[in-house]
Image (cartoon, rainbow, N blue to C red):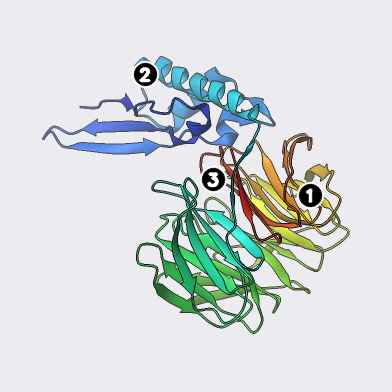
Amino acid sequence: MYGFQCSQWKPSDPRQVRNVNFEIAIYEEIGAQKIKVLDLYQPSVIRKHGEMTNVDLLVEEIRRAEPLITAARTEQVKHLILRLQDKIGQQDEHKFYLFKVLRAHILPLTNVAFNKSGSRDKIATGSFDKTCKLWSAETGKCYHTFKGHTAEIVCLAFNPQSTLVATGSMDTTAKLWDIKSGEEALTLSGHSAEIISLSFNTTGNRLITGSFDHSVFVWDIPSGRKLHALIGHCGEISSAQFNWDCSLVATASMDKTCRLWDALSGKCVATLTGHEDEVLDVAFDSTGQLVATASADGTARVYNAASRKCLAKLEGHDGDISKICFNAQGTRILTASSDKTARLWDPHTGQCVQVLEGHSDEIFSCAFNYEGNTIITGSKDNTCRIWR
């Protein structure tokens, strides 16, 4: 026989809305239970073009796609979606405040990242001092200092399981570090120039590295085997990111363009233009429908990944924008700039909704945590700031 259940609504804090999903349980005659999880928190499902989706139409669409959701369960599904929309609406109004300052390294920071699973309170920082440090975002305790690179660490990322941290360095290599033991797990060699960007896919079995040698390499993890190279930019690579289903890779370059690549074939499928100076960073939203770019021209842009059209231009910074990212809900964009500020934006309207001030030097990096309720910024002033 078949049964249906919704997972328990645990978060009382509206900022933890991202943890909610559906569980469909199929009960076989022998009594064994199988669980199918449908993650219904998808920004494109809950809202379209900045507006909340019509719930009745959405429920009918879900029923057509998932036959286990019967007519008798329609109201249950509708009720949960309404609660999700309510929580998202509350989250959009959240204003961030300074929670903690970490004086992380003796030399300037180059990048910061949040872990993606588990307790989700860990952050990693990379520095000109050639080390990467693992910290508690709650207490400021340093868990590990990863040493092994022979030049500055300029990029880093957690794998989705938060068991590994990857670091890229000016020494032309990338390294993977075991979070639990603090030991080096793997070294990736092959680029002929500095690695300044890297990113895992959503399953953690692929890593991409972008280099000043104008190329992006796709690596198999954990074997460390290079699968193929993305070649076509006529300038240094500044950033490379997978989209949510790992079908596309976006790359930003000093040649003032962003390119989209087929992740399997390695072929370029589109070139996004419009910036007047080097493109310093690129990011997909969690659905892969939007692509955001940050540039040395002091602006950021939001593109539709399918149509390649520019949807919004983010203007307001007084210097280069070195970093850009979406929150998990897709409702906010965060940018970091050489003007010593970070800014929050509405990706649909291009409106700046908050300016985060306090660093005494340019901000190199910024990131949202998984729930979107905490921000970390890393600066040339040798500190990272945690905002809530």
Residue 352 x %, y %: 78, 37
Q: Secondary structure at mark 2?
A: helix
User: Nearer the observer, disc 2 or disc 1?
Assistant: 1
Residue 305 x %, y %: 68, 49
Which part of the image, by quadrant, shows the N terminus?
A: top left
Comparing 263 with 349, the one in front is: 349
User: Are dots 1 and 3 in contact, CB under 8 Å?
Assistant: no
Name the residue located 81 percent from the left edge and 52 percent from the top edge: 339
Name the residue located 54 percent from the left edge and 71 percent from the top edge: 131
Comparing 200 with 289, the one in front is: 200
Badge 1: few (under 14), some or many (20 or more) residues near its Cα, within 10 Å?
Answer: many
Which numbered disc, 2 or 1, marks the residue that appears first in the sequence? 2
Name the residue located 31 percent from the left edge and 25 percent from the top edge: 5
Picture layout, residue 267 above or below residue 23 = below
Badge 2: few (under 14), some or many (20 or more) residues near its Cα, within 10 Å?
Answer: few
Please, what is the three-letter code of the amino acid marked with disc 3?
Asn
Q: Residue tagged by mark 3? A: 369
Instruction: Find residue 144 and report its image quarter.
Output: bottom left
Residue 31 x %, y %: 13, 33
User: Nearer the observer, disc 1 or disc 3?
Assistant: 3
Residue 80 x %, y %: 45, 22
Point out the residue furthest to the right here: 276
| Label 1, label 3: how far apart the Cα atoms are | 21 Å
Q: Residue tagged by mark 2? A: 73
Please, what is the three-letter code of the amino acid marked with disc 1?
Ala
Q: Horizontal placement of 196 versus 21: left or right? A: right
| Label 2, label 3: how far apart the Cα atoms are | 33 Å
Identify the disc placed on residue 300. Answer: 1
Name the residue located 44 percent from the left edge and 56 percent from the top edge: 203
Point out the residue furthest to the left here: 30
Instruction: Find residue 261 and report its image quarter.
Output: bottom right
